[in-house]
Amino acid sequence: MNNIKNQFPIFEKESGLTYLDSGATTLKPRSVIEKMMDYYTNYSANIHRGVYGISEQATTAYENAREKVAKFIGVEDPSEIIFTKGTTESINLVARGWGDKKIIEGDEIIVTEMEHHSNLVPWQELAKREGGLIKYIKLGQNHKLDLSELAGSINENTRILAITQVSNVLGAVNQIKQIADVVHDINPEVVIVVDGAQAVAHMPVNVAELGCDFYAFSGHKMYGPTGIGVLWGKKMLLDEMDPVNFGGGMIGEVSKLESTWAPIPDKFEGGTPPIAEAIGLGAAVDFLENFGLENISDQENEVAQYALSQLATIEGLKIFSAGEAGIMAMELSGVHAHDVATILDREGVCVRAGHHCAMPLHQILGAGATFRVSLGIYNTKEDIDKLIVGIKKAKDIFKV
Ligand code: 7TS
């Protein structure tokens, strides 16, 4: 992976940039940008409508992207891949389309204490609409998920388990296969919804092997464009789910008062979809597969372990992570996380500070705010050295 930065045009303009915020969004490689430019420059027609050449070309490129995404996460039938705006929209689609239809009063929806708001709030709202109950799996030692806690929270009323594969704060990797087995041993009917936003760009993912029912992720956190994401669901579940976005492109027949729906995936993709973005996402899949997810994971782990070893030398720094999946949130005693991030910015180091859309988790951590390092394919040990210099500057400035 030598000279990987050459593949990211942003480093040509910003040669001193140390980007440690890939958990928020990754930078974009040239191949993705060019693929989208190619669509806009050479065949920017709408899809699924025209019989003329450039429209057919656009349709083929859009559907090719769907096939690439399907293969990327181990799905055989591309019609199970629904393009959405991102993880948030994907989870909302399940909560509305499946949840509103299936959840009745007294049904239990299980979440964990480490969820991003996008995998909490849609379930809270579903529970309110339908009279369901939200139950939390408490975190155990080292803020890891405790399987006996999990088993204890599943019963005959459990309908949904909504769980992240990788925490965007702790970096903790949840063993979804093991979790799905535990859950289904107790109640085989539980629908498992996995938030894969922080996983897909950092480790190989095969949804068939995970044993889940739905899997959601965003293009922009995997070197693809913003405005595109994915919901994968088992065909049987998607077929019985209601669409939530009604209009052109998603219908079977429309009469004056009634309509029927197109088969999946079109049923869920009403209106003109993000065509360029889907095509760009296909290029992002190619980009990732070109390196291999195992290689990416190995490299990011090496940088993360180096980071942990260096960070451990700084007094007053509390790290809420074991460095898994390249994510490390931390707190510097006596300095607000936003102040640390501002001082790091002056050194050209980008990190995110705040609650990272995980307020319940921050309450449990006892931290109002943390600053977070999240790695990508372009990060090196030199980036970590700059981070360390920056944190030491913050300590000097605040005299802590
Ligand atoms: N789930 C997880 C685990 C996430 O980390 C995020 C975004 C989302 C869902 C939502 O993704 P979206 O693409 O729909 O916005 N997380 C972050 C983050 O950690 N910093 O900025 C965005």
Image (cartoon, rainbow, N blue to C red):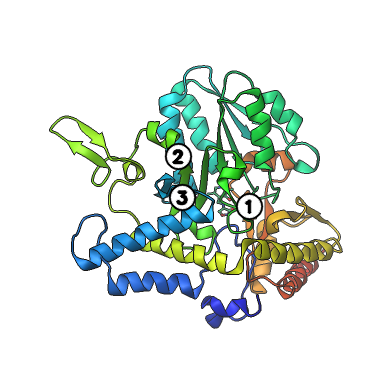
| Structural distance between the alpha carbons of marks 1 and 2 | 24 Å
- Residue that appears at 43% across and 31% down: 98
Tag 1 secondary structure: strand
List x then y, in percent, for residue 73: 54, 52
Judge whether 2 appears above or below 298 on screen.
below
Tag 2 secondary structure: helix
- Residue that appears at 67% across and 61% down: 294
Q: In this view, does 268 lie to the left or right of 295?
A: left
Name the N-terminal-most of marks 1 and 3: 3
Q: Which amino acid does label 1 sit on?
A: Gly
Which quarter of the rendered picture does the N terminus lie within? bottom right
| Structural distance between the alpha carbons of marks 3 and 2 | 12 Å
Decide if ligand 1 comes within 8 Å of the CB at mark 3: no
List x then y, in percent, for residue 90: 46, 44
Residue that label 3 marks: 230
Neighbours of disc 1 within 10 Å: few (<14), some (14-19), many (20+): some
Neighbours of disc 2 within 10 Å: few (<14), some (14-19), many (20+): many
Judge whether 15 appears above or below 342 on screen.
below
**Disc 1 + disc 3, Cβ < 8 Å:** no
Residue that label 2 marks: 92
Q: In this view, does 306 lie to the left or right of 278?
A: right
| Nearer to me, 57 or 140 | 57
Q: Residue 354 carries which label?
A: 1
| Structural distance between the alpha carbons of marks 1 and 3 | 27 Å
Would residue 398 be visible to someone looking at this image?
no
Q: Which mark is residue 142?
A: none
Q: Which amino acid does label 2 sit on?
A: Asn
Judge whether 214 appears above or below 387 on screen.
above
Image quadrant in which you'd find residue 141 = top right
